[in-house]
Amino acid sequence: MIPDGRWSDHANDNTGLGPSWVAAIVNAIGGFNNNCGYWQNTAIVIAWDDWGGWFDHEPPVVLAGNQGDYQYGFRVPLIVVSAYTPRGYINNVNPHDFGSILRMVRRYLPH
């Protein structure tokens, strides 16, 4: 799901409503009472499409070795909300890219 401009988190268009839009989607699936039936087998992946012009104190990671033209860019947030995610878990150790989302989906989908 992609919100329209009213809910944008981009620096020049930010109205502050983006987090409310995301919370509404998460609550519709997980809910406070978890009575919709989806929560126990659903993972919600919240990703931003770019860094939005916000300041990042960490420079982009330069991969060792011959990686051709592929290098990491500015960091973007990624949040996984699910019954599988340990409470309070944060991983800042290794950078990943958007392909990591596909790897997670392939790993946990029934074959």
Image (cartoon, grey):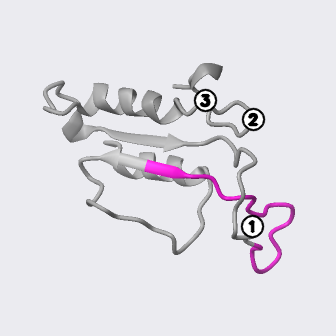
Q: Position of residue 67 (x, y in %)?
A: 80, 69
Q: Which residues are magenta?
A: 62-79
Q: Position of residue 71 (x, y in %)?
A: 78, 64
Q: Residue at x 38, y 27 (%)?
A: 25
Query: What residue did someone put label 1 on?
Result: 60
Query: What residue did someone put label 2 on?
Result: 12
Q: Nearer the viewer, mark 1 or mark 2?
A: 2
Query: What residue did someone put label 3 on?
Result: 15
Q: Residue furthest right?
A: 69
Q: Residue furthest bottom?
A: 64
Q: Quadrant of residue 68?
A: bottom right
Q: Nearer the viewer, residue 107 or 83?
A: 83
Q: Amino acid at mark 2?
A: Asn
Q: Are marks 1 and 2 in contact (CB under 8 Å)?
A: no
- Judge whether residue 70 is colored magenta: yes
Q: Residue at x 34, y 64 (%)?
A: 89
Q: Quadrant of residue 72?
A: bottom right
Cα separation, mark 1 vs mark 2, equals 22 Å
Q: Is residue 31 above or below residue 111?
A: above
Q: Is residue 11 visible?
A: yes
Q: Position of residue 103 (x, y in %)?
A: 50, 52
